[in-house]
Image (tube, rainbow, N blue to C red):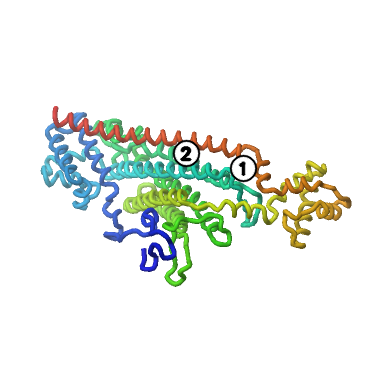
Amino acid sequence: MSVYRAANIRLAEGVRPELAEVCLPGPDETVLGRYARMAPQLAAFHAFDKAHIVMLMEEGLLPVADARAMLRVLRGLEASDAVMQRHATAEHMHSGEAILTETLGAEVAGKMHLGRSSGDLLAVSFRYTLRERLMRMADGLNALRHVLLALAREHVHTVMPGHTHLQHAQPDTFAHYLLAYASAFDRDAERVRQFHARLNLSPAGAAILNGSEFALNRDRVANLLGFDGLALNTRDAVWGRDLEIEAHAITVLLAGNFNRLSEDLMLWSSPEFGLVECADGFCGTSSIMPQKKNPNALECLKGVVATATGYLVSTAMVHKNPSTVPVFEWVRSMSDAWRGYDEMNSALPLMSAILQTLTVHGDRMERSAGRHWATATDLAAALVRHAGLPWRVAHQVTGITVRMAVESGIAPDELTPHMVDAASQQHLGRPLHLPEDVIRAALDPRASVGRHRMPGGPAPERVQEALALHDASLAADEAWATSARSQVDAAAQRLEAAIDAALHA
C-alpha cells in the first residue's frame, strides 16, 4: 500500500485483499478501463447471437446450412476467449456479425440480424449482464447476513450503551444492535428478489420499437437465455427506463444501510469510545504519526453510498429526455450500472471480512452503559409501579433527580432514596420513600435490558426469537438464489444442446 504502511510496524499484518480490492484499484487500460467498448456486455451479445440464430433456423427463417456455419464459427470463438475476440473487433454489440462477415462473408453473415435491432441487442444485454451482477450481489449480501447473525449470537448478553443525538439513551445489547441491520439487510434481499422478477424478462424480438413483421419466436429466445418470460410491449421493452433507475436505487439503499453500520463502527473504534476495534489488515497508519491506526476499510465503505447515489442521479438525468431520444447517453449510462454493481460486489465481502475479524470490547461496553443516567427511564417506570405516579409526573421527578445528581457530581450507582425524595419534594411537595433496592434494580443496565421483553426488544429471549426469524429469512433467500442460478445454468445447457442438435442433425 505504501512505504510506511508495512506489517509489524504499527499494524501487525499487511493490507487484507478485501480492502485492496475496494480502496486500491489498479490502473485503467483506457479512460473507461474495463468498461470500454461495452466489454461487460460482450458475453450477453455472444449468447444472444447464438440463441437468435437457433431460433431463426428452427422457425424456418434462416437456411439450416447457413445457421450451422454461423454456429460453428461462434462455437469456435469459445475455444480460446470469445469475449476477447469480440472486444478486439471494436464492434461491441455487432461484434458477432463482424466476425461472421470476416469468416463466412456478408452473404451468409448478413442473415443473422433478421428481426433484430441495436435496440433489443442493448436491452437484452443490459438485463442479461445486470442479472449476473445482481445474483452476485445477492450472494454477497447473503454471506454478509450469515456473518452478522453469527456475530449477534456471540453477543446476546453483551450489554452496551444506546445513543440518540450522540448522547447516551438507553442500555442495549450488541446483538440487538446488530439485528437492526439484519432487519435492514433482510429488506435489501427482498428488494433484490422483487427487482430480479422485473428484470428477468426478455426484450428479445422487440427490435427498436414495433418488433418485426417476421414470425420470430420470442418465447424460444427468452427460454434459451434464462429469462422468466417476455418484456411484452415492444416499445416498453426497449425504451422503458425505470428498471435502469431502479437498479441504482437498489444499490443506494443497500450502500446506505452498511454506510450507517460503518459510521457507527468507525465512531466506536475511536479511543474516546473504544467499544470495537478493526483488525490491523483493514486499517492504515500515518506517514508522520507512527501511533495511528486508521480504520481505512470503514472509510472506504462509507464512500460507496456517495458513488452509488451519483450513478443513480446520473442515470435519472439521462432518462429525463423524451422517451426515444437518449440513445448514446443511454449507452454511456450503462457503464454506471456496471461500475455501481462492481463496487457493491467488492464492498460486500469487505464488510463481511470486517465483521468476521471485529474485536468487541464487551467489558468496556457494559461499563459505559451504566454511566450517564441511561437507565433514567427505568427509574421513572419504577416510580409509576411503586409510587403510583402518573407517567408524566414520574418523568418530571426523575428529570429533577438526574439534574440534581449531575450538579452534585453523583453517579447513578450512588443515587440514594433521600435524593429521589428531595426531587419529589420539589415537584410534588412530598417525599416518595422509594426503597433503595428498587432504585438499584431500576438503574442496573443489565437488568434494564432484561426488562425490555416486548417483541423485537433487546431481552435475550426476544433476541433469540429474532435470530430464528432472520435465519429463516436468510435460508429462504439462499434457496431462491440457488434456484435462480440453476435456472440460468439450465438455460445455458438448453442453448448448447440446441446448437448441438442443429450441428449434428
Quarter holding the N terminus is bottom left
In the orientation shown, which residue stands out farthest toward the top? 505
The quadrant where residue 382 appears? top right
Report the amino acid beneath label 2. Answer: Glu
> Is 505 in front, or is 317?
505
Disc 1 marks which residue? 458
Image location of residue 395, percent across then percent down:
76, 49
Rendered image quadrant of residue 166? bottom right
- Using the image, tell me which numbered label, if any, was put on residue 201: none
Amino acid type assigned to the residue bearing label 1 in the image:
Pro
Of 245 and 292, nearer the camera is 292
Q: Is residue 47 left or right of residue 16?
A: left
Residues at circles 2 and 1 in contact by the CB criterion of under 8 Å: no
Closer to the camera: disc 2 or disc 1?
1
Q: Is residue 430 visible?
A: yes
Q: Residue at x 43, y 41 (%)?
A: 142
Q: Position of residue 155 (x, y in %)?
A: 55, 45
Q: Secondary structure at mark 2?
A: helix
Outermost residue toward the bottom?
Answer: 288
Question: In the image, what residue occupies the spot 45% across and 34% down?
Answer: 475
Q: CA distance from mark 2 to mark 1?
A: 24 Å
Q: Residues within 10 Å of mark 2 (few under 14, many from 20)?
A: some
What residue did someone put label 2 on?
190
> The C terminus lies in which quarter of the figure?
top left
The spot of residue 419 in percent (x, y) is 81, 55
Please tell me which residue is depicted at 22% across the width and 47% down the height of the picture: 83
Q: Residues within 10 Å of mark 1 (few under 14, many from 20)?
A: many
The image shows residue 20, relative to residue 218, as above or below, that is below
Does dot 1 land on a helix, a strand or a loop? loop
